[in-house]
Image: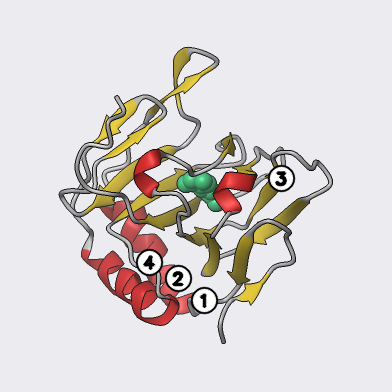
C-alpha cells in the first residue's frame, strides 16, 4: 500500500504508519542503537554555538558533504543494515538518496526545534524520507505564513513520512520536547545532497 497523502495545502506530505513490519523495525533499531558512532552535534542557536539536544550521525556516500547550522559534516560510511532500506526507498518510492541523517532521542527532553530542510545542497524541492524507530513521538508541521495550516502526527515504530515538492519552502517542522516519560527513539532522514562545493561556508 503506498503511503497516504495528507491534506496539507502548499505541501506534499505522505505517511505510512507501518512501512516496516515490527520485527524488521526492532532489528533495525537494535542494530543502529549499538552500531552507530553517535555524537553530539553543535548547532547555532540565536547566534551562539550549543550542543544539540539529541545524538546524531551523518551517514552517506563520500561526496555527500553536508553543511548544517554552520558546521561541515563529512559522511560516515553506510552501516550494512541501511543499504536495503535505501534500495527499497529508491525502488518502491522513487526516493533516491545518497545520505541519511540519523538522530537518537534519548528521552522526552531530547528534541528538534522548528526548521525546514532547505539547505542549498538539497536543491529547490527536496525529497526527505523519514523513518522512525522506537518510542512514538509527536511531529508537527506549520505553514510559514498561514498559522492555521498545521498538522501534528504521531511518528511510531516502523513508520515512513515523505516530504517533497514545496513542503520545505512553505512549512517548518519540529519534534517537540515532552514531559511524558518516553523511551529512546531513532529517526532516519534519507536525503540527496548535491556533491561538490555549493559555495556556502
Ligand atoms: O526526528 C524527527 O522526526 C525529525 C527529524 C528532522 O526533522 C530532521 O532530521 O531534519
Ligand atoms: Fe527536518
Q: CA distance from mark 2 to mark 4?
A: 5 Å
Q: Are marks 4 and 1 in contact (CB under 8 Å)?
A: no
Side of 198 where 122 appears, left or right:
right
Which quarter of the figure is the N terminus placed in? Answer: bottom right
Nearer the observer, 155 or 167:
167
Image side of residue 125 versus residue 99, left or right: right
Q: Are marks 2 and 4 in contact (CB under 8 Å)?
A: yes
Dot in front, 4 or 3: 3
- In depth, the one of 31 and 89 nearer the eye is 89
Q: Quadrant of the C terminus?
A: top left
Per the image, the residue denoted by label 4 is: 28
Q: CA distance from mark 4 to mark 1?
A: 13 Å
Q: Which residue is mark 1?
A: 19
Q: Secondary structure at mark 4?
A: helix
Q: Quadrant of residue 154?
A: bottom right
Q: From mark 1 to mark 2, how far is it between C-alphas?
A: 9 Å
In space, the residues marked 1 and 3 are separated at their CA atoms by 24 Å
Q: Residue at x 73, y 59 (%)?
A: 9
Q: What residue did someone put label 3 on?
A: 142
Which mark sits nearer the N-terminus, 4 or 1?
1
Helix, strand or loop at label 1? It is: loop
Left or right: 110 in relation to 186? right
Q: Which residue position holds label 2?
A: 25
Amino acid at each position: 500500500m503506498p503511503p497516504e497523502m495528507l491534506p496539507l495545502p502548499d505541501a506534499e506530505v505522505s505517511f505510512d504508519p507501518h512501512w516496516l513490519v515490527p520485527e524488521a523495525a526492532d532489528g533495525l533499531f537494535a542494530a543502529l542503537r549499538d552500531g552507530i558512532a553517535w555524537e553530539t552535534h553543535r548547532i547555532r542557536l540565536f547566534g551562539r554555538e550549543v550542543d544539540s539536544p539529541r545524538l546524531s550521525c551523518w551517514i552517506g556516500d563520500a561526496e555527500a558533504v553536508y553543511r548544517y547550522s554552520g558546521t561541515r559534516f563529512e559522511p560516515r560510511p553506510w552501516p550494512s543494515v541501511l543499504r536495503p532500506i535505501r534500495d527499497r526507498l529508491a525502488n518502491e518510492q522513487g526516493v533516491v538518496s545518497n545520505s541519511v541523517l540519523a538522530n537518537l532521542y534519548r528521552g522526552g527532553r531530547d528534541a528538534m526545534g522548528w526548521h525546514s530542510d532547505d539547505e542549498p545542497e538539497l536543491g529547490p524541492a527536496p525529497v526527505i524520507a523519514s523513518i522512525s524507530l522506537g518510542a512514538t513521538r509527536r511531529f508537527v508541521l506549520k505553514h510559514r505564513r498561514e498559522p492555521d495550516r498545521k498538522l501534528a502526527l504521531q511518528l511510531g515504530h516502523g513508520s515512513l513520512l515523505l516530504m517533497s515538492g514545496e513542503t520545505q519552502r512553505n512549512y517548518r517542522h519540529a519534534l517537540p520536547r515532552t514531559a511524558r516519560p518516553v523511551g529512546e527513539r531513532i529517526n532516519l532522514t534519507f536525503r540527496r545532497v548535491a556533491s561538490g562545493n555549493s559555495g556556502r561556508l
